[in-house]
Image: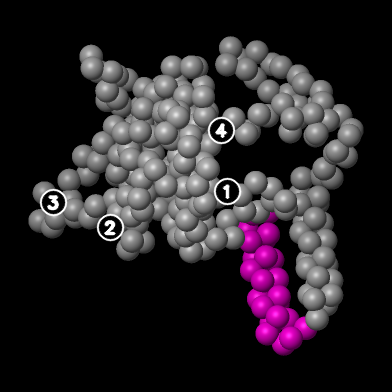
Amino acid sequence: MDGLLTRKLRQDGLKLRKLKSSDASASTIAASKEAMLQDVIRIVTLCLGPPPPADEKFTWEFYDSAHKLKTVSLTPREFAASAEVTKFVSLTNDPRNDYMRLLTVSNLGNVWNGCPVSYINVDSIVLKEACVAQLRKGLPIFFGSDVGQQSDSRKGIMDTDLIDYELGFNVKLNLSKAERLLTGESQMTHAMVLTAVHLDKDNKPVRWRVENSWSDAAGVGGYFVMSDKWMDEFCYQAVIDKAVLGKEVREVLKQEAKVLPLWDPMGALA
């Protein structure tokens, strides 16, 4: 379904560009977009079934942390209201841009009339302190990273010392995090969940436990171990409860966001 939708949207995007360049009227372009959206709705409905009406209850079944089956019956509106997504913000670590700066990416949002997608850019120390604080509250953390760098999906290890290219090939690969972003060598490629952290006697993180979505055949029962140095180099985003952030970080949300171009790697995962 994802591949089909991507192909369809790319095709429709080219058609809309041609309409715009041919000086088609606004009503003609709007009608074309409406027809294209109907195609998208048809594809999604045939694949997943029709969405429930906004005020009609649906049943959601899931297993809680104690592996007990839970059932919830509520309307889509009630579900949206209970999610409390406004409590959370995205922190990012992008050394190309100033820290304590609000960032966004051009044309990143994909929800009509939805809130703009924005990031608070912080250094890696602030990002990790926020992650530790949220884990102490018992809340897991959605995070975005470049999972293909120095990682072994079979063993479930992510570590900057995993492969020694210098020893094997006598070459130095010492691009900084900013340089990797600038050259397209790295970007956010995958979202996973932080579920625990190992702290040393000074309460500094040593390694992190990561829950992945590649089934329990990957890693150890679906879990990976990530070194703290790997997090510094290849973690770019973490979704954090505003309650664990200091006032200075929360104040960044009042800034007018710096708009990055639509091809920027900070928009790769959204």
Where does the magenta region start and end? 1-24
Q: CA distance from mark 2 to mark 4?
A: 29 Å
Q: Which residue is mark 3?
A: 166
Which of marks 4 and 3 precedes in the sequence? 4
Outermost residue, bottom side: 22
Tell us which disc is closer to us: 3 or 1: 1
Which labelled disc corresponds to residue 238?
none
Instruction: Find residue 234 and report its horizontal and vertical position in percent.
Output: 34, 44
As displayed, is residue 48 above or below residue 1?
Answer: above
Q: Residue at x 52, y 29 (%)?
A: 242
Please report the residue visible at 36 percent of the width from the left and 45 percent of the height from the top.
Answer: 99
Residue type at mark 4 is Phe
**What element does badge 3 sit on?**
helix
* In this picture, residue 171 sits left or right of residue 42: left
Find disc 2 in the rendering and name its residue: 179
Residue under label 1, please give it. 117
Check disc 3 and give the amino acid type.
Glu
